[in-house]
Amino acid sequence: MTENPYKQLAQRLDTLPNGFPATPSGSELRLLAKLYSPEEAALTACLRLTAETPAQLAARIGGDPGELRQQLKGMARRGLITAERVGNELGYRLLPFVVGIYEMQVDTLDAELARLFEDYFQEAYSQAMAIQPPVHRVIPVNETVRIGMEIRPFESAAEIVHNAKAWGMLDCICRKQKALIGQPCKHPADLCMTFSDTPGAFDHNPTIRALTYDESLAALRRAAEAGLVHSVSNNQRGLWYICNCCTCSCGVLRGIAEMGLANAVARSAFVNRVDETRCNTCGSCVEMCQFDALAMGMMAVEINEIRCVGCGVCVIACPEGALTLVRRPEDEILPPPETDTAWREARAKARGVDLSDVL
């Protein structure tokens, strides 16, 4: 076992399905050193994806349960690990770096961390994003789907909002990170949405601003009108956030725009269609599309179905109502894994990772 606690932790994070690839320059170690003390890194490298109480952890790795509890609580407050109920007490478990540890740093992100992340992103993250199934998938703006077309609950942003009992908003760490390295984009930063099954879950949260149901629906509309793409975790059940993304800042969509990874995000079950009798070739939709899926033809806009991810952002930009989303043929639709557990298993298999040591 390596004596470098940051290398220990990096290797542990890379055994998770999400991945945390090593780099020739060691940029991943510098990133972890910004977030963890050596002692914290060594302890986190011992955690599993299944939560353990301090007493359970002490029985497995040694140490005093009381001292471990204080260390673990401190790291959980800083979003370096996560805490959840195990019986009548708190247990602690490992988080993936993305989505997980990194996103929890939205309040403490500074220019140094932003630059360290960018260095790592440029050097290694294409390796993680190229693995299937993707971490994220696109869901369409609801009113852009043709009337009468089947929309399953996990395919609908409005349905995800409807099924929640609490709604919250926080800043987008991706747009904040790009601004801190001197590359801000034009899109609003306050449009990352999170949900809970517990009423009032965000009422006293220092980072998340609590919303009402109606405010959450209005936020979806504001995101779409700003040209942002709804994306969620790539599973059907247990959806607890909607990222409103752009190819200029989003760590996932930049994989498409900057690295040419067409499958960095799973496309929705829908594809664009144009009514040529309505299209006046104004170009509004072409300007709005972030995936270069639209081009102006002689008589109407032309759609590249391979590049279209089925987000629907261009549909609401069309002043003539010439665009709409229709369901792709069933043989072109790859259903997302049923649960997060199923996603982890599929991703681990694709990476050749054995999950038995981290569960």
Image: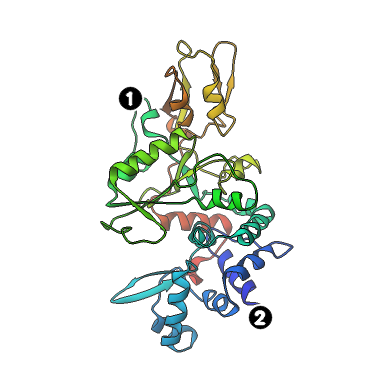
Q: How would you rate the neighbour count of disc 2 (Cα within 10 Å): few for under 14, some for 14-19, many for 20 or more?
A: few
Secondary structure at numbered mark 2: loop
Q: Residue at x 44, y 71 (%)?
A: 76
Q: Nearer the viewer, residue 11 or 287?
A: 287
Residue 143 horizontal/vertical position (percent)? 36, 30
Q: Is residue 69 above or below residue 343?
A: below
Mark 1 is surrounded, within 10 Å at the Cα level, by few (under 14), some (14 to 19) or many (20 or more) other residues, namely few
Indicate the colouring scheme: rainbow
Q: Can residue 150 be seen from the camera position used here?
A: yes
Q: How many marks?
A: 2
Residue 53 locus on image (x, y percent) = 38, 78
Q: Is residue 312 above or below residue 214?
A: above
- The answer to which image quadrant residue 301 occupies is top right
Circle 1 residue: 147
Q: Amino acid at mark 1?
A: Ile
Left or right placement of residue 85 versus residue 187 in this view: left
Q: Nearer the viewer, residue 184 or 267?
A: 184
Residue 195: where, in percent of width, then height?
35, 52
In which image quadrant can residue 205 be found?
bottom left
User: Is 156 displayed left or right of 310 in the figure?
Assistant: left
Residue 153 in sight in this render: no
Q: Residue at x 57, y 49 (%)?
A: 251
Specify the amino acid type for callout 2: Glu
The x and y percentages for residue 91 are 38, 74
User: Which residue corresponds to the image point at 33% horizontal and 31% vertical from the top-left?
Assistant: 150
Residue at which label 2 appears: 3
